[in-house]
Image: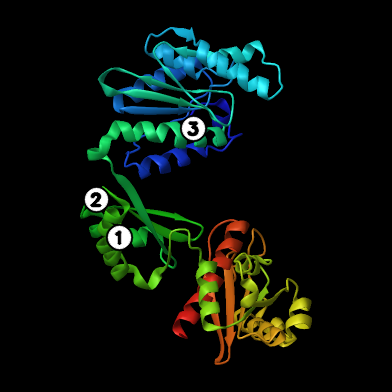
Amino acid sequence: MVGTELLLGEVIDTNSAFLAQRLAELGVDVYYVARVGDNRQRIAKLVQEACQRADLVITAGGLGPTADDLTKEAVADAFGLEMELRKEVLAVLEERFRLLETCMSDNNRRQAYLPKGAQALPNPKGTAPGVLLELAEGKAVIMLPGVPVELEAMMDDSVVPYIKQRLGENEAATIYSRVLRFYGLGESSIDSLVQEIMEAGTNPTIAPYAGGGEVRLRITAKAASETEAARLIEPVEEQLLNKLGPYFYGHGDEQMEMVVARLLLSQGKTVAVAESCTGGLISNRLTNIPGSSGYYLQGAITYSNAAKESVLGVDPKLLAEYGAVSEPVAKAMAAGVRQWAGADLGISVTGIAGPGGGTEVKPVGLVFFGLSHAGGTKGYRRQFAGDRLQIKDRAALAALNILRQHLLESK
């Protein structure tokens, strides 16, 4: 990936993820992803190194008309090639500018220069043509523009067919992944529980990664087709769920609120939410799901004690005796919001998000939850680590998981 803006953090690199996904679908293993600034010598060195360790190198960025667009020149330097003007490429550029009713500057002529022996790749979304440079020993360098919409179109229109042709039918394959999502165990705990399964084979492989208060396990298989890869994954998934079943909640991009929404709708139940420290995050996640009006009735952000009393009917004596951050108050909040809304379920949260406000008895990150239903009201205590926003996010996720577990138990 070429561009000083990537190294400065001014632009987020989405091209790497897109290219990796497309290559995985073709069964092409991606071993390295590198970023380099707009420096001709460094780009040339990086491309040389990449060609030593891979058969196919794809660059993104640096094909524009300005002085800092240096990718083609650097690749030419890397292999001792001259740059040459391609009249057919220039004609395409001139026609494009004519259709746009825009004058083509001298700078744009630079885009018609390619390393000697290279082939231009059409760009249906922009002016910068891509470049295919085939080298000795079956190696190749493909240069694509850095603008995502241009790169994606050229990848699908030109690069994918080229790679399929190179692979041939006998080598055609796919890399397919299935992601399992878990809540309630940390990454290290999950790793220790499934270490033997992870070390047992190389196809499929298992990779854990954590974030946002949960852990995901990605199972990846390589096979001639997606169907065959899925078949390889199934017994490994079964082994993992046998070990971690109580903590599993979903697949792929399925977030906790999606699971909760599905359970609420399937059981015909409604929910109301009372929030203090999360400031509306639980309600936000529950209502992000299309069709949420079928289960979500209303919510209350009762940040102050006065709001807890006036809106939810929390007894002032509970607040005085136990404090706002306590299990009795959380339970009263859940019961109050359930009664106020006439809902089947009431879920509540109250805690100390920090960074201040904590004590030795009630430290920052301490959060209480309440869940009220027809059979009674239950309280929960959790302790979270992180900064203020992390604690709020983790508390919202924990509340959703409490709802999920209750709905599963009541099926």
Q: Circle 1 sits on which residue? A: 192
Residue 101 drawn above or below residue 332: above
Residue 122 x %, y %: 50, 26
| Residue that appears at 32% across and 68% down | 241
Circle count: 3
In the foreground, 78 or 291? 291
Q: Find out whether the residues at labels 2 and 3 contact each other: C-beta distance under 8 Å.
A: no
Under circle 1, the secondary element is: helix
Residue 305 x %, y %: 75, 76
Q: Is residue 391 left or right of residue 31?
A: right
Under circle 2, the secondary element is: loop
Q: Is residue 224 left or right of residue 401?
A: left
In the foreground, 339 or 76? 76
Disc 3 residue type?
A: Met
Disc 1 residue type?
A: Ser
Instruction: Tell me how far mark 2 sits from mark 3, CA to CA.
Output: 31 Å
Disc 2 residue type?
A: Asn
In the foreground, 182 or 149? 149
Residue 243 drawn above or below residue 203: below
Q: Circle 3 sits on which residue? A: 154
Q: Circle 2 sits on which residue? A: 203
